[in-house]
Image (cartoon, rainbow, N blue to C red):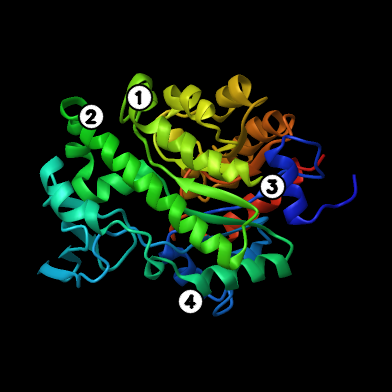
Amino acid sequence: MKELSSRERIIRILQRKEVDRIGLFEHFWGDTHKAWTSRGHIKEGESFDEHFGYDLNLAWVFSTVADLDFKPVVIEETEDTILQKDGNYAMLRRHKKHDTTPEHVDFTVKERTKWEELIKPKLKADPRRINFEAYRNAKANAAKNKRFFCWSGVNVFEMMHPVCGHEYMLMGMIEDPEWVRDMVDTFSTLTIDLQKMLFEQEGWPDGIWYYEDMGFKERPFMSLDMYQDLIQPAHARTIAYAHENGRPVIMHSCGFVEPLLPGMLEAGIDCLQVIEVKAGMDLLRICQNYGDRLSLIGGIDVRKLYSNDRAQIDEELETKIPTVKAKNGYVLHSDHSIPATVDYETYQYFVQRGMELGRY
C-alpha cells in the first residue's frame, strides 16, 4: 500500500481497514515539554505533534465550569501547593511545581438541593464557554499538516465530579439516582448545544474525542448495570450526535473499565483509549475480545518507559504490536501521559521501534 497521510491513516484505523502502518499519538505531562526543551531536544515553541510526526491533533476549547464570572479564591497557599475555590464552588488543591491531578478537598454541592440552586441554572450554552479562535487555529494547522483533527473535551462523568466530587456523585447514584440523571441530562444537553454552536460557525472536526475516567485500580467506579442505567444514555446521546454527522468517537478512560465495555459499545464508541495496564487493563485481551468491533489507542505500559531501559521497551512492544496490528485498528500510545523522568532518547527509541514493528 502507498504511504497514507495521517488523516487518511486514522480514518481507516477507526474503521479497522487496511493501512500502511499503525497510527502514532501521545499525551505528555506539561513538565516533560519544559524539560526536553530546556535540554535542547525540542525547539522553543515546537509542538510534540510536529517533532514526532503524530497522526492526530486535538483541540480542547470548552469551559464547563458552572459560574463563568467567578474569580477563583485562594484558601491556602504554601511553597508547593495552592488550595482554591473555583467556579463550581469546589475546593481543589494543586501542586505549583509540577503537573498532577488536583486533590479534592471539599465541595459546596453534595446533594440535589445545592445542585439545583447553585449549578444547574448557570449551565447554559453561552458562547463565552467556547474558544472559537483556538479551535479555528488548531483545525487549520491539522489541515495544513494532513492530520486527523479531533474536537476534545469531557463527557458527563468527568463533568459531574468537579462539581460534587466522586464520593458524593457515587453516593448519589445509589441514594438519589434522579439527581444524577438530572446532572447527566443537563451536562449532555450543554455539550451538544455548545458543539452545535461551535461547529455551525467553524465547521466540523474529523472526529470527537471524549475524556471519561470511569475506573481506578482493578475496578470501575460503578457496575455495568449502574453505567447502563445512569451514564450510558448520555453517552449514547452525545455519540449519536457525532454519528449522525458522520464523525467517529474516541473515548478515553483511565482505570479499569473493561467491565463497562459492553455498555460503552452499545453507546456507540468507535475507539477506546488509553487501556491502563497498571489498573488491570490488558491490551491483548481487549484486542482479542473486542478488536473486531473497537479500534484501540494505548495499552503500552508507561512504566517500561520510566525504566529508560531499551530491553524492557523492546519486550513490551514486541509482545503486543504484532498482535494488535493484525486487526488494522491500532494507534501506538502509552497507557498514560509521559512524565519528565522519561529520557528524550528513550521516548525517541520507543517511537522508532514501535513504527518499525507497526509497518504492514
Q: Is residue 233 left or right of residue 319?
A: left
Q: Residue at x 58, y 71 (%)?
A: 136
CA–CA distance between discs 2 and 1? 9 Å
**Label 3 – label 1 distance at C-alpha:** 34 Å
**Mark with earlier residue (3, 2):** 3
Q: Is residue 101 visible?
A: yes
Q: On the image, numbered disc 1 is attached to which residue?
A: 229
Task: Please give left or right for residue 116 compared with residue 197 in the image.
Answer: left
Q: Is residue 285 shown above or below 192?
A: above
The foreground one among 282 and 263 is 263
Residue 259 lies in what quarter of the image? top left
Residue 177's mark? Answer: 2
Q: Amino acid at mark 3?
A: Gly
Check the picture and name the quadrant holding the C terminus.
Answer: top right
Q: Amino acid at mark 4?
A: Ser
Tell me which label, 4 or 3, sits earlier in the chain. Answer: 3
In this rendering, the answer to whether 134 lies above or below 206 is: below
- Judge depth for marks 4 and 3 and give the one in front: 3
Query: Residue 188 occupies which quadrant of the picture?
Result: top left
